Image: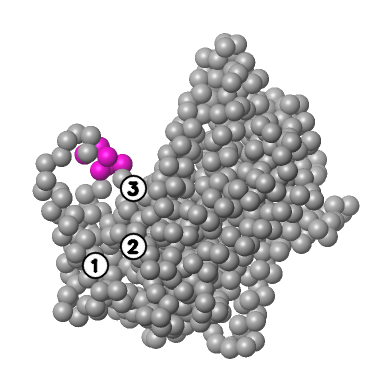
């Protein structure tokens, strides 16, 4: 941790303060900042660190692993989460570099505009807004399923209104309220996942009430990989490919750290820590979680199969709960159900935040109506937040179809959409890195340097395109064609492709040339603020601290 802070400090001290811009002008938009306002840095270190560790852990990990396990088997699910995790980690490493170098308003969308091509920035911005809105609806649908576990007599519309109202209230006043809520939600999720992993290990080693040592029993019978659609090795390969859909959905939103960078205090000190902790979230929560669930429940468990096929709400369809009940442990379903509810609520909150900031980025870039650039005196893009909340009203589709059916459609539809965002960010990073080299700008002084770059970014780019291609592969098999499934699987291609084509048709243009890339706009003010924050940090370091405060400093 010390090395990260010192590197940020050294980077800040290398700045020429005489050339710094006046305070408050870290702005890259085309609308009048004095008229429309600007975002404010209200997220503290602990907010960002816990958003990185557990902020985007949603229903995919608790509920989505059930259908994936049933379709593909434990080894396929484990490998899918491991591979997808490596892709996300590679993407976050590159994003950490570019974000800590230039943590400015507009973030992701502005990076695509500056370093890829304007059409890609336009397409990614609108795609991100719509995909965030759809995932917001998906998580609200999941939350309504969870609440129905306790009481299915109240109309689902009541819960939707209540959830939306709370999400709106957490996003509409000050950004710190979003940070505080994610800090609390993430803490709850992290503690619960750790507890579930410990319980899974105890059960697997024979420490449960039945004293039955499981080991890798279920990997031998009924098997590690299940056939899907075809027989033999081809069927097991199909099952393995299908498991990527759930794995990718579970990781969507990992880039929210970069979205929050422009509202984070001392981003060059705090963002690198958050990026590095993404590794532990991927390994400890997702990879170990996928491994653990495959060890304590077989893919052909009749209780799990019946819960999924009948669309049972909440924890009833969670493989964790079914496994614990099979082991003779009672009383946990309600606890797990509460965790799933907070996870869905947390993700809905996070995607409302991320989607509204990307809509704001489009507005300040001139790609959306200026009204969405309007910020309150506390730095909240009020109309952008209201637009995302309004999008959440599509969750009322639960009233005419089952929550499980609606949730599954949302999962499939947003997977390809989110992948296109990762593709664009990879292209922007690769060209940003190449642009620095062409312009003779050394990377030695960057406040954060990712692993194996730029090769890791190329790996992310290739794998994301592969994931998009296989997202709905099963509809192309004879006898399995479904127009609705095809549309759901590849709707994300249209969500990205249509705005890209519209921009190319109306304004044309191509890739940004390396010799005209903008590496400086907005940077001077970030540099100046970083010097101030570094001075404050060093003063705090001189003050004596108790053991408790030192431990807290390591954590956040």
Distance from disc 2 to disc 3, alpha carbons, whole Å, reads 14 Å
Neighbourhood count class around disc 2 (C-alpha, 10 Å): few under 14, some 14–19, many 20 upward: some
Taking depth in this image into account, of 238 and 480 the one nearest to the observer is 480
Asked whether disc 1 touches disc 2, contact meaning CB atoms under 8 Å apart, the reply is yes
Disc sitting over residue 501 in the figure: none
- In terms of sequence position, does the residue under pointer 2 or pointer 3 come before the other? 2
* Residue in the picture at 62% in, 77% down: 500
Q: Position of residue 188 (x, y in %)?
A: 46, 37
Q: Is residue 73 left or right of residue 548?
A: right
Q: Is residue 189 above or below residue 490?
A: above
Q: Residue at x 21, y 49 (%)?
A: 2
Residue 406: percent from left, percent from top: 73, 50
Secondary structure mostly seen in magenta is helix
In the rendered image, residue 396, in percent from the top left (x then y), is placed at 71, 54
Is residue 522 shown to the viewer in this render?
A: yes
Observer-nearest of 502 and 22: 22
* Residues drawn in magenta: 550-555
Instruction: Give the residue number, with chain letter if any, for mark 2.
Output: 41
Residue at the disc numbered 1: 529
| Mark in front: 1 vs 2 | 2
Which residue in the protein does label 3 denote? Answer: 46
Can residue 378 be found in the magenta stretch? no
Q: How many angstroms separate mark 1 from mark 3 (CA)?
A: 19 Å
**Camera-side mark, 2 or 3:** 2
Q: CA distance from mark 1 to mark 2?
A: 11 Å
First in residue order: circle 1 vs circle 2: 2
- In the image, taking residue 242 as reference, residue 16 lies left or right, namely left
**Secondary structure beneath disc 2?**
loop
């Amino acid at each position: 941790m010390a090395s990260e802070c010192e590197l940020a400090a050294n980077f800040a001290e290398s700045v020429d303060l005489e050339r710094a811009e006046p305070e408050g002008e870290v702005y890259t938009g085309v609308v009048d900042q004095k008229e429309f306002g600007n975002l404010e840095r209200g997220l503290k270190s602990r907010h960002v660190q816990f958003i990185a560790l557990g902020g985007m852990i949603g229903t995919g990990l608790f509920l989505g692993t059930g259908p994936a396990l049933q379709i593909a088997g434990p080894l396929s699910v484990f490998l899918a989460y491991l591979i997808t995790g490596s892709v996300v980690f590679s993407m976050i490493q590159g994003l950490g570099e570019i974000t800590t170098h230039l943590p400015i308003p507009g973030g992701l969308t502005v990076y695509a505009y500056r370093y890829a091509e304007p059409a890609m920035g336009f397409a990614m911005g609108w795609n991100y807004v719509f995909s965030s809105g759809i995932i917001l609806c998906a998580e609200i649908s999941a939350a309504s399923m969870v609440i129905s576990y306790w009481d299915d007599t109240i109309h689902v519309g009541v819960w939707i209104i209540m959830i939306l109202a709370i999400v709106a209230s957490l996003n509409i006043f000050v950004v710190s309220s979003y940070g505080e809520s994610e800090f609390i939600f993430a803490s709850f999720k992290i503690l619960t996942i750790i507890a579930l992993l410990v319980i899974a290990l105890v059960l697997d080693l024979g420490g449960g009430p039945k004293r039955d040592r499981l080991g890798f029993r279920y990997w031998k019978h009924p098997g590690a990989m299940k056939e899907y659609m075809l027989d033999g090795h081809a069927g097991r390969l199909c099952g393995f490919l299908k498991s990527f859909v759930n794995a990718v959905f579970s990781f969507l939103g990992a880039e929210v750290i970069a979205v929050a960078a422009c509202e984070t205090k001392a981003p060059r000190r705090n963002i690198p820590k958050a990026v590095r902790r993404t590794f532990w979230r991927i390994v400890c929560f997702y990879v170990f979680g996928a491994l653990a669930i495959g060890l304590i429940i077989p893919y052909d468990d009749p209780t799990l199969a019946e819960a999924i096929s009948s669309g049972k709400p909440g924890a009833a369809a969670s493989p964790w709960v079914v496994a614990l009940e099979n082991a003779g442990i009672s009383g946990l379903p309600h606890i797990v159900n509460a965790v799933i509810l907070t996870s869905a609520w947390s993700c809905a909150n996070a995607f409302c935040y991320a989607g509204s900031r990307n809509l704001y980025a489009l507005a300040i870039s001139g790609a959306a109506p200026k009204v969405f650039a309007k910020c309150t005196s506390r730095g909240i893009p009020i109309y952008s937040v209201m637009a995302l909340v309004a999008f959440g009203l599509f969750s009322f589709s639960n009233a005419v179809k089952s929550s499980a059916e609606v949730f599954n459609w949302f999962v499939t539809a947003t997977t390809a959409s989110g992948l296109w965002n990762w593709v664009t960010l990879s292209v922007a990073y690769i060209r940003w890195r190449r642009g620095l080299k062409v312009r003779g700008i050394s990377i030695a002084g960057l406040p954060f340097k990712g692993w194996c770059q730029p090769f890791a970014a190329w790996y992310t780019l290739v794998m994301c395109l592969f994931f998009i291609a296989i997202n709905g592969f099963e509809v192309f098999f004879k006898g399995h064609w479904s127009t609705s499934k095809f549309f759901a699987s590849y709707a994300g291609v249209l969500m990205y492709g249509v705005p890209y084509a519209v921009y190319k048709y109306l304004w044309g243009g191509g890739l940004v040339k390396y010799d005209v890339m903008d590496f400086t706009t907005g940077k001077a003010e970030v540099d100046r603020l970083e010097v101030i924050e570094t001075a404050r940090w060093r003063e705090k370091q001189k003050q004596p601290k108790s053991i408790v405060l030192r431990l807290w400093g390591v954590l956040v």
